[in-house]
Amino acid sequence: MTTATTNPVLRVAPAAPAEAAAYFRASLVFHADVSDVAAALAAGADPGFVVLDSRSTASWDQGHVPGAVHLPTALIPEQAGQLLDRSVPVVTYCWGPGCDGGTRAALALAELGFQVKEMLGGFEYWVREGFEYETWEGRERRAADPLTAPVGDEDCGC
């Protein structure tokens, strides 16, 4: 018996390099990293996109990305046209990696003709990576979780 048949990682062979490149390029078309979104927003200039929080009002009140537009997924069909400009790409997010609300919001927006990406990690990773967030009481920031962000360095090397 060969290693490929007993090793669960290689039981299914990796894709050919050209197929892998196409897949990973396509993934980047659909997703944005929390750190990249934060860096673009912190640069001071117009980032060229709008951030959309697709969670409930109670969730929004617990904390949200500064400057984000609040539009719960269920309200996207009736309100997106009034709140968003179709010429500006939208980056959606929800709670975190265990929640597909950001995906559902991105789908709803795409079906309405918006260019859209989903922010990987959602609000959870925004907070865990130590980025400032807003609540109804003002702005807050938690220390970065060393399991999700480099300690003492803003560049993770990704």
Image: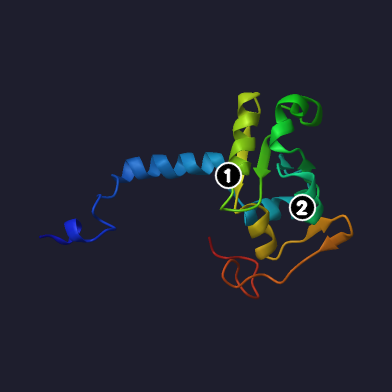
Please state the horizontal and vertical placement of residue 131, each as a whole percent of the image.
72, 62
Q: Which residue is mark 2?
A: 64
Q: Is the residue 151 above or below the residue 63 in the image? A: below
* Display colour scheme: rainbow
Q: Residue 125, image x and y in percent?
A: 63, 59
**Camera sees residue 4:** yes
Res. 113 mark: none
Looking at the rendered structure, the kind of residue marked 2 is: His
The x and y percentages for residue 54 are 70, 41
User: How far apart, in angstroms, are the residues tagged by discs 2 and 1?
Assistant: 17 Å
Residue found 62% across the figure and 42% down from its top: 101
Q: Residue furthest front?
A: 58
Q: Is residue 87 visible?
A: no
* Residue at x 79% of width, y 45% of height: 57
- Quarter the N terminus occupies: bottom left
Crowding near the residue tagged with mark 1, few <14, some 14–19, many ≥20 C-alpha atoms within 10 Å: some
**Residue matched to label 1:** 100
Q: Give the camera-side residue of 6 and 51.
A: 6
Judged by depth in the image, the label closer to the viewer, 2 or 1, is 1
Give the farthest residue toward the right: 137
Q: SS of the residue at dot 1?
A: loop
The quadrant in which residue 144 appears is bottom right
The residue at the far bottom in this view is 152
Of labels 2 and 1, earlier in sequence is 2
Total number of numbered discs in the rendering:
2
Relative horizontal placement of residue 137, taking residue 118 as reference (left or right) = right
Disc 2 secondary structure class: loop
| Above or below for 128 versus 63 | below
- Which amino acid lies under the numbered mark 1 shown in the image of this protein? Asp
Residue under the point 65% across and 67% down: 154
